[in-house]
Image: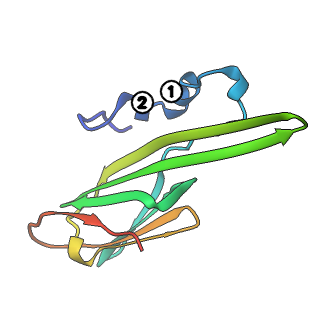
Amino acid sequence: MNSLTRLDRIESMFPELFRRWARPMPFFEDVELPADIRIDVTENDKEFIVTADLPGARKDDVHVSVDGNYVSISAEVKKDEEKKEGRSIIKETYRGSMSRGFTLASEVDDKASIARMEDGVLRLTLPKRHGAGGSKQLTIQ
């Protein structure tokens, strides 16, 4: 079991509990709130490959930053839906954000890092680096 560090938020320990508790009214049951950012990290001798699911997020609304061996992913989610039923019009709008940060086993070469987004899936290629460096914001292709 992981221990809670000073960078972890309490709601990240029980995300589904807090998400259900934060729902405004029961008549919005059909509105889907964005899921947490789920990631898969694989590693080989040269690089880390990170795959992150970002449902509902557009490429322009996703931000990735790398600082040494710490990677931060954040996204803004916007959802507009309009339903017409006879003379009634129902319009549901959602705006929200999600974020995730994690530490890798070794530092990342931020100059050679690549971020790609396709069909709601972000794929990061993070080459390993030996030595010190700074922080860089990645551009998503």
Q: Position of residue 93 (x, y in %)?
A: 61, 39
Disc 2 crowd, CA 10 A, few/some/many (<14, 14-19, 20+): few
**Above or below — where is 65 with respect to 78?**
below
- Residue 104 position by quadrant: bottom left
Q: Residue at x 35, y 38 (%)?
A: 2
Q: Is residue 75 visible?
A: yes
Circles 2, 1 touching at the beta carbon (< 8 Å): yes
Q: Residue at x 29, y 78 (%)?
A: 46
Left or right, 117 with reference to 102: right
Q: Residue at x 75, y 35 (%)?
A: 90
Q: Position of residue 13 (x, y in %)?
A: 42, 32
- Judging by the rendered image, the residue that carries numbered circle 1 is 18
Q: Amino acid at mark 1?
A: Phe
Q: Which mark is residue 11?
A: 2
Q: Residue at x 67, y 37 (%)?
A: 92
**Above or below — where is 25 with respect to 12?**
above
- Look at the image and tell me in which quarter the C terminus lies: bottom left
Q: Position of residue 20 (x, y in %)?
A: 58, 27
Which element is circle 2 on? Answer: helix
